[in-house]
């Protein structure tokens, strides 16, 4: 493991790609190794621009992610892609987008792709995703695209720990804008209406712009950012200028509009650096990560302090309505920590 | 509070509805009161049939939930509806479905409706939703419909703690079946294709049935249930017969097919009782609930043991890459518990 870490951290030419892949497998599958690997690599992280990409199923996210990756490659940027896919017992997590992706992007050493399934508990997935991103960051990938397939809070949580978050919409999926219903619009730094050649695209763009206008300019989203309405006059001091969320149109299938998205992503990075917002987001990500790890550590400690049979007896008493959940928690907590 | 608890638990005629509403507000807004209320009511819970209803935005879930509620009312069943809505700073969480719902169902004392926003952290939402369900259960609501608007893991988690889970699909939202992509099909006890008068409905039904067939009959879903393929011969002993997931068609707007859904829900309850699966699900819910509460308790203890400024210093060191997250956790944990 130490050797692999040296190869990755040293960004050596030979065996670098294979070492990166092996470290990623380690942090995915072995919690003790994850601790060692992340401990050793962590000081080398913090260089990558982490870009979260989310939106409802059917919006064409995967294709758009591929096109964004290709654009960055033309700028000679090293690109990591982390695709967080919910797994299903039916498909085994092998989605169409993956196959297209492999055909499109494989063979380029400047791109590293990793798909992650959300099998098992989601807390674990957030932790593992964070660690995979760190390995890629330490390995020198300058842009890391984190694509989440679902549209729920948990996937949003993963995407929202990014520096820049893109929310993708598509026209013609009924009258509703799905991201509004799913409550994910509020994490967007950049809005993209993909499949813009379809009927209804203009309507969707208009609706999104209206939504941005409706967001009262004094409202602050969960990043602590002000949501500023589109088309508002720029404040006098450009250093203090808040970010104005653009609504862009793309046709990912033929690459149309993708250059503008990449341009917007790069401008957003500049804004983050200039405004000090970059550090704010680093702090938010660190806070969330430490919290998740603390909870996992706590559960592990509890499980070693209280035997499974004791725990199951308490659970059975709750299920039988002999013990209320709060009293059950007090009992387990006291057994472990007093 | 004691008086309110007596009124709710005693199922008294006078002031029962108002007392239920006030206890629900208490468990939603005041953690200390939640502990007291749930502690007092818990022994009176366990009677209600909890039905989770989920599916992608645009599938017409809210309308279908209303129609299911009306059917149960015709059977003289008391119905609680808990709608878990992701909130958005743009809409404030007041979705169209709610307005339709209020117009349709208000004025019937046998129905109690509560909308919950997923503002703030989701762990909190799962806890609060569980407590609201308990108050309704203790208050004598025999069927509790828990509708989740999103299609992510976290909403699925809430829906999956139900005794019976309905997954709603709609035809004509592109070629993909959205629940498959979002990985929520595997929690379904009953599949419903709503808007079945739209073109493409047959295709969607066929695709869902094929998916069920593809699920290898020995595959066990996350409830520990076997996924049994449709149309398989019934095993010899009907008491041991596994549940065969039906695929039903509805047009919620005019009530078409809703009676069959309600019939299927009632048959599923019988199956749960006869097979012992009811208790299995009670245990699973209790286990999950105790785990969530333990984590919340732990964080609260840590926050009282380690001052905010100390915690923020550790977070800042992580953000600056001076301390890796695992070492940060070890430091905080030791400060709180050694």
Image (cartoon, coloured by chain):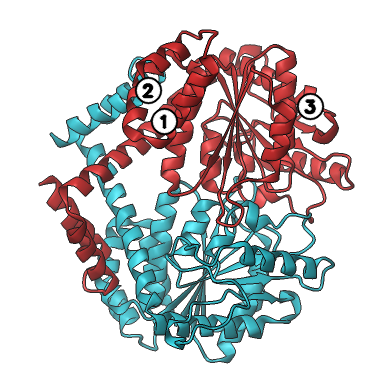
Chain colours: A cyan, B red
Question: Marks 1 and 2: CB-CB under 8 Å?
Answer: yes
Q: Label 3 is found on which chain of the structure? A: B
Q: Label 1 is found on which chain of the structure? A: B
Can the viewer see residue A281 in this picture?
A: yes
B294 lies above or below B73: below
Same-chain status of marks 3 and 1: yes
Query: Which tag, 2 or 3, sits closer to the chain's start?
Result: 2
Find residue B258 and name its label: 3
Left or right for B62, reference A165: right
Residue that badge 2 annotates: B37
Look at the numbered disc 1 and give the secondary structure of its residue.
Answer: helix
Question: Marks 2 and 3: CB-CB under 8 Å?
Answer: no
| Residue depicted at 55% across the width and 56% down the height | B89
Residue that badge 1 annotates: B27
Residue A94 percent location from the top left of the image: 62, 58
Left or right for A251, reference B45: right
């Amino acid at each position: 493991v130490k050797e692999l870490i040296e190869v990755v951290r040293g960004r050596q030419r030979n065996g670098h790609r294979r070492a990166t892949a092996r470290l990623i497998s380690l942090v995915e599958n072995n919690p003790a190794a994850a601790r060692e690997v992340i401990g050793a690599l962590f000081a080398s992280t913090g260089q990558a621009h982490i870009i979260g990409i989310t939106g409802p199923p059917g919006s064409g996210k995967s294709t758009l992610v591929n096109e964004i990756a290709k654009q960055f490659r033309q700028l000679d940027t090293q690109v990591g892609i982390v695709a967080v896919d919910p797994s299903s017992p039916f498909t085994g997590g092998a989605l169409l987008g993956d196959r297209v992706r492999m055909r499109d992007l494989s063979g380029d050493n400047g791109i590293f792709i990793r798909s992650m399934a959300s099998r098992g508990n989601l807390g674990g997935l957030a932790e593992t995703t964070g660690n995979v991103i760190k390995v890629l960051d330490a390995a020198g990938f300058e842009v890391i695209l984190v694509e989440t397939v679902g549209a729920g809070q948990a996937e949003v949580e993963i995407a929202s720990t990014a520096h820049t978050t893109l929310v993708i919409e598509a026209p013609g999926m009924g009258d509703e804008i799905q991201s509004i219903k799913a409550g994910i619009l509020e994490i967007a730094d950049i809005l993209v209406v993909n499949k813009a050649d379809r009927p209804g695209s203009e309507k969707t763009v208009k609706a999104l712009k209206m939504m941005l206008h409706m967001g009262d300019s004094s409202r602050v989203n969960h990043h602590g950012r002000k949501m500023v309405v589109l088309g508002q006059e720029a404040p006098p001091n450009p250093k203090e200028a808040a970010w104005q969320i653009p609504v862009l149109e793309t046709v990912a299938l033929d690459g149309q509009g993708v250059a503008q998205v990449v341009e917007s992503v790069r401008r957003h990075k500049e804004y983050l650096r200039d405004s000090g917002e970059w550090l704010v987001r680093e702090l938010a990500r660190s806070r969330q990560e430490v919290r998740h790890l603390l909870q996992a550590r706590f559960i592990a400690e509890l499980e070693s302090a209280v035997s499974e049979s004791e725990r199951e007896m308490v659970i059975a008493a709750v299920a039988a309505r002999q013990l209320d959940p709060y009293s059950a928690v007090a009992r387990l907590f006291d057994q472990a920590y007093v």
